Image (tube, helix red, strand yellow):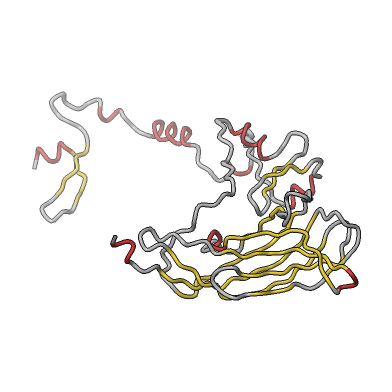
Amino acid sequence: MMTFLMRKKKYKFVVSLTLEELSSVPFVSGQMFIKCRLLDGGSFRFISPREEVKDHQVKWRCSSSFICKMSANPSNGVLDSTILRLSVRKEVKGGRSSQKLGFVELDLAEFAGSGQITKRYLLEGYDNKNYRQDNSTLKVTIGMTLLFGDPLFKRPSSNIPIHPPPQNNSLSDLSTALVGREGKTSNLDGDGSSSLADGCPNSAIDDEKTTQLKLDIRDIPADNGCYSTRIDSVQLINQLVEETNLEKFDNTNDDQEVGLELIVTKDGTTSLACKSNLKSS
């Protein structure tokens, strides 16, 4: 009952929308544009410029910014869905009318606090019963910045699948997953899906700075220049033993202890003295 009486949290975001391109267009020619409309949280409307179809794709590269209002559940802080509809249309009758090809609905709550994100979406048809939808995909880039509200919020669960990294025990298996044996590299698109690029040249792999998980361990020769400035520890010990005169200790009495002793005074200073000298004093 108390949760029902609590007011929802209010937020304002600055949304940056970039319409990139439409690929796999089933037309050879024609003028196409996108009509954007915010269904919740504001009255934003935007129409992209008309662009020609070239090689079965249309490139807009146009951007627009607007303010979007959002609300969140007061109990858990999860943002409510805010839908932005992108309608792809084609000019007919010399530009006097337009034909609706498909649309994409974006939930802006899923992009909150994620920075700049680029994704691809498959167009949905307006009439799924009498018309078979094509495989045209729309590429968009969205960035959101919090303008007003509590920065502690949660995004709703996304339907985008998550691809975990490969769990291999050896470095060789992991390097094979990153760099294929036949020149195949694994790339991640903006939507998080993975694709394989066949026959990728070595120069392209070098440009992408592909990590190679192979350790090249080589034996350094003994006559290498780095050893010329180092001291041989074995030779130094042998030299000290040869130069030490141990004959003067042979004539000492059995009851006389020979050696050095560490003396620590009351003020904390230390010194070394012979044991025989300590007993005589």
Question: In the rendered image, which quarter contains the C terminus?
Answer: top left
Q: Which residue is the extreme one toward the front? A: 130
Who's the residue at 67% across and 44% down the image?
A: 194
- The residue under the point 81% across, 64% down is 99
**Residue nearer the viewer, 272 or 194:** 194
Q: Position of residue 142 (x, y in %)?
A: 62, 65
Image position, residue 233 (x, y; %):
46, 36
Residue 1 image-quadrant placement? bottom left
Q: Is residue 220 visible?
A: no
| Residue at x-position 16% and y-position 45% | 263
Residue 172 falls left or right of residue 237: right
Q: Nearer the viewer, residue 16 or 188?
A: 16
Residue 164 or 205: which is nearer the viewer?
164
Q: How many marks?
A: 0
Residue 58 or residue 125, whichever sits in front: 125
**Spot occupied by residue 17 in the image (x, y as percentages of width and height):** 65, 69
Seen from this angle, which residue lies furthest top?
254
Q: Is residue 208 above or below residue 151?
A: above
Q: Is residue 158 left or right of residue 135?
A: left
The residue drawn where x is 82% and y is 71% is 50
Q: Is residue 228 left or right of residue 103?
A: left
- The answer to whether residue 203 is seen in the rendering is yes
Q: Position of residue 258 (x, y in %)?
A: 20, 32
Can you tell which quarter of the image residue 144 is in? bottom right
Q: Is residue 220 above or below residue 47?
A: above
| Above or below 195: residue 47 | below
